[in-house]
């Protein structure tokens, strides 16, 4: 576009405003308050005036820098970034804020070509390439529109709350929010200076937190979040939960006596139940621990039933601690002893270890429960019904037994030398492997496997 064509476009632009008393000359366009446009050989200079129709006066916007536009640019495109009647840019302050333009700068110069914005302090000029200016003005206009729209939506929301307060009428529920609005609040709350709970509570009331909890749960249920995020969320909460469970398990494991009246024992008990009097035996403490946390540990079950009672079972105890139904509809009989029980005794004549009487009794007891399951000797028919319903099998074949007993420090009471220590590990492995459909685990093995799992969880929250 030639300088002459550019001048004609500018004159056409200002004539279309239909403001009174404007004077159009070869070198300038003016109004009663001053020169609006000045033409020179290379550029056009535009100052921002506005016409106040109600008072029939012109006023200059003193907080606007002079706009200097090169004839080489497409001046029509530059001027048309206004989007409104008149030539003032209502969101001009946004551009000034983006570029940090203060009043020490007198001109904003739009040039043809170039890739960078230059701050020419000696000339008191900000120089902007045409394409960057047009994009920036367009983006600023979007900010202007969104800001105005968000303000209107916020006012509507608050007015609706007042309607409910003063008229007891529930306003019609509508989504008074646009795409991108939510990011503003999230980014404000996600600043690096917020590291602790108190940093957030300063800006949230009870209603805020309640709404956030409800909304987050709904977003999860409605599958709005990505599968990767949901998986990382699951891993985070599982990991944090397991950390707490491991700590409690290790505290029980550290108890060196069966006495539940010690302060140390009472402190652990209160982490599992509310009433310290509820538990008076170490075995009961472990049973309650597994009742509460079994599904979080190394076991995978669809359902766990505590204390299913059987008929015609030898011994005083007629029920296993737990019956678990795994994801293949198989049944596990789970027996919980204590970490202070021994599992092995030294046989000096054969120079090897064998099962202790305590573990042997537990194995026989577990076998009896397994037989009772196969023969369906349930004391209560309702127990049989719920087991067969969930397994979808009338006949209950091949249950498995799991005995949790002892710990690494209590495997045997025999004094260990180097030879016996080597035999202990070897014989414990052999004896465990010799059992059919019965698995023997120590308490610290379960906690160690769980701890290893926690370490291996891939999480973005490290």
Image (tube, rainbow, N blue to C red):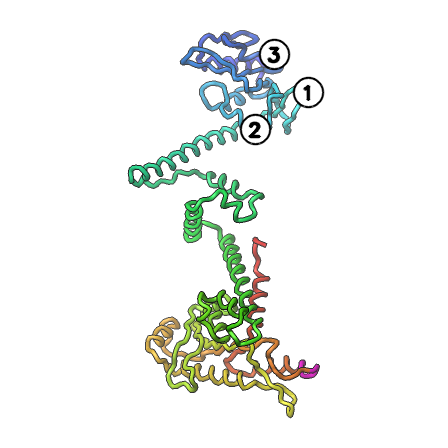
In the image, what residue occupies the spot 44% across and 47% down? 209
Q: Nearer the viewer, mark 1 or mark 3?
A: 1
Gap in Å between the C-alphas at discs 1 and 3?
A: 21 Å
Q: Is residue 435 above or below residue 182?
A: below
Gap in Å between the C-alphas at discs 2 and 3?
A: 29 Å
Q: Secondary structure at mark 2?
A: helix
**Residue carrying label 3:** 40
Mark 1 or 2, nearer chain start? 2
Quadrant showing the C terminus: bottom right
Q: Are marks 1 and 3 in contact (CB under 8 Å)?
A: no
Whole-percent x, y for residue 113 in the image: 62, 25
On residue 122, the disc is: 1
Whole-percent x, y for residue 204 in the image: 47, 44
Q: Is residue 170 left or right of 232 when viewed as pictured?
A: left
Whole-percent x, y for residue 379 in the image: 35, 80
Which region is colored magenta? 417-422
Q: Secondary structure at mark 1?
A: loop
Gap in Å between the C-alphas at discs 1 and 2?
A: 21 Å
Which of the two residues, 246 or 452, is positioned nearer the viewer here? 246
Any magenta on residue 19?
no
**Residue carrying label 2:** 97
Mark 2 or 3, nearer chain start? 3
Q: Secondary structure at mark 3?
A: loop
């Amino acid at each position: 576009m030639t300088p002459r064509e550019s001048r004609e476009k500018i004159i056409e632009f200002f004539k279309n405003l239909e403001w009174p008393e404007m004077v159009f000359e070869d070198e300038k366009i003016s109004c009663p308050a001053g020169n609006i446009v000045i033409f020179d050989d290379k550029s056009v200079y535009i100052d921002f005036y506005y016409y106040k129709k109600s008072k029939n006066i012109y006023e200059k916007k003193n907080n606007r820098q002079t706009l200097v536009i090169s004839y080489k640019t497409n001046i029509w495109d530059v001027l048309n970034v206004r989007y409104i009647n008149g030539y003032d840019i209502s969101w001009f302050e946004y551009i000034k804020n983006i570029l940090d333009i203060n009043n020490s700068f007198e001109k904003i110069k739009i040039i043809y070509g170039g890739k960078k914005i230059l701050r020419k302090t000696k000339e008191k000029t900000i120089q902007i390439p045409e394409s960057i200016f047009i994009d920036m003005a367009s983006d600023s206009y979007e900010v202007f529109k969104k800001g105005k729209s968000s303000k209107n939506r916020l006012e509507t929301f608050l007015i609706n709350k007042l309607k409910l307060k003063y008229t007891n009428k529930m306003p019609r529920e509508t989504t008074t929010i646009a795409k991108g609005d939510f990011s503003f609040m999230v980014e404000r709350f996600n600043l690096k200076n917020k590291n602790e709970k108190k940093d957030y509570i300063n800006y949230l009331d009870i209603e805020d937190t309640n709404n956030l909890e409800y909304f987050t749960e709904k977003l999860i249920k409605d599958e709005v979040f990505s599968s990767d995020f949901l998986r990382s969320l699951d891993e985070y909460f599982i990991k944090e939960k397991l950390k707490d469970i491991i700590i409690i398990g290790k505290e029980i494991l550290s108890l060196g006596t069966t006495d539940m009246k010690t302060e140390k024992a009472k402190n652990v008990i209160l982490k599992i139940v509310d009433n310290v009097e509820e538990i008076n035996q170490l075995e009961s403490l472990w049973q309650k621990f597994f009742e509460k946390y079994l599904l979080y540990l190394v076991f995978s079950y669809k359902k766990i039933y505590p204390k299913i009672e059987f008929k015609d079972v030898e011994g005083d105890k007629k029920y296993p601690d737990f019956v678990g139904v795994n994801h293949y509809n198989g049944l596990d009989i789970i027996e919980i002893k204590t970490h202070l029980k021994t599992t092995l005794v030294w046989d000096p004549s054969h120079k090897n270890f064998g099962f202790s009487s305590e573990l042997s009794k537990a194995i026989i007891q577990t076998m009896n429960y397994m037989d009772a399951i196969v023969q369906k000797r349930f004391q209560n028919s309702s127990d049989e019904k719920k087991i067969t319903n969930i397994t979808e099998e009338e006949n209950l074949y091949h249950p498995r037994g799991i005995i949790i007993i002892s710990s690494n420090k209590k495997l045997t009471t025999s004094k260990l030398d180097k030879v016996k220590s080597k035999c202990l590990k070897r014989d414990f492995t052999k004896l465990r492997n010799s059992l059919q459909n019965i698995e023997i685990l120590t308490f610290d093995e379960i906690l160690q496997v769980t701890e290893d799992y926690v370490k291996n969880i891939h999480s973005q929250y490290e």
